[in-house]
Image (tube, rainbow, N blue to C red):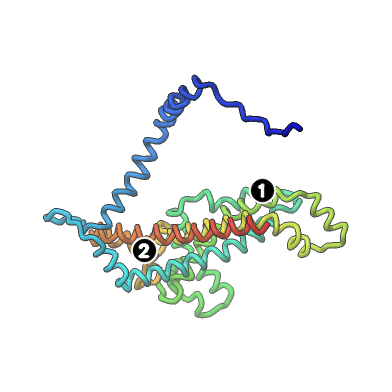
Amino acid sequence: MTLATAPRRPTAPAADRAARPRRDLGAWFLVLPALLPILVLSVGPLLYGIGLAFTDAQSGRTQATRFVGLLNFSDLFQDSLFWDSFRIGLIWAFGVTVPQFLLALGLALLLHLDLRLRWLARALAIIPWAMPEVVVGIMWRLVYHPDAGILNETLRDLGLSGAGDGRDWLSGLATALPAVIVVGVWAGMPQTTVTLLAGLQNVPRELHEAASMDGAGAWRRFRTVTWPALRPIALAVTALNFIWNFNSFALVFVLTDGGPGGRTRLPMLFAYEEAFRYGQFGYAATMGLAMVAVISVLLALYLVGRLKGDDDR
């Protein structure tokens, strides 16, 4: 009796095995021009910031910078202003991300329909995306202007006495944060819309036609056909938008500069104030390191959720 044996994998000749390290070394030399800028511009500042977080570096200080260990971290965890900015950052991130996604999903579904001039609607929808955040902030400061702003003018024209009577939306303690959230939703919605629209275009049209032949209505087709295909993209874009919004700086800086009374002071704005207004570079670097840790946790939760979802399928 003969035993069947699995075919043996052919082995590379000894000369080829000896030449492989030299080929790998040559490949590293080829990617070195692209790797050096990444190391200098990304990894270098990151390592410098990590080192700065363990020192008492200050601007205008005549004494040498000292290593203080975990003292900055201890001060940070006891800093009520930092935790207040962290709470405002979470409110801002949720307040922008959730309505941004819902509005973008509705807009993407409308733009996916076979309508005339659909290309024009798509082009108009991405205009806010093409505008720099500084320009968006200046434009919306004019919209919210207490005297000449179009918002107060519109409210007065609608006969809403008191609502638009010279109210300064960006300076009010109760209205400042909702006002900047509205701007954040408007500014980021095109990017989410385009991403979801790309996902919708990958859903096979035959599935919709088969569901229609089975008598499924619009809501049932969305629930059973569209959403299962769109869900991975929706989760990814929501997670990335939340992280992006939590790290926002320029838009809120132009709109309110963190005011009034710190009601819109996001964590990045707080770190900026400590570094460039009060000269506390070491303490500001500690805040940056803490934010990196928070974002890493959020990314880890997202990746675990994705892996669990892949295992369940």
Is residue 58 visible in the rendered image? The answer is no
Quarter residue 106 falls in: bottom right
- When the figure is inspected, residue 234 is found, relative to residue 92, above or below; the finding is above
Quarter residue 296 falls in: bottom left
Residue 159, image x, y percentages: 57, 77
Q: CA distance from mark 2 to mark 1?
A: 36 Å
Is residue 251 visible in the rendered image? The answer is yes
Give whichever of discs 2 and 1 has the lower sequence position.
1
- Amino acid type, mark 2: Asp
Secondary structure under tag 2 reads: loop
Q: Quadrant of the C terminus?
A: bottom right
Please name whichever residue, 132 or 194, is drawn nearer the observer in this view of the structure.
194
Secondary structure under tag 1 reads: helix
Residue identifier under label 1: 120
121 left or right of 248 in image: right
Residue 8, image x, y percentages: 64, 30
Residue beneath the point at 46% across and 68% down: 90
- Amino acid type, mark 1: Leu
Residue beneath the point at 47% across and 58% down: 139
Residue 58, image x, y percentages: 20, 57
243 left or right of 113 in image: left
Residue identifier under label 2: 257
Q: Quadrant of the N terminus?
A: top right
Which one is closest to the eye, mark 2 or mark 1? 2
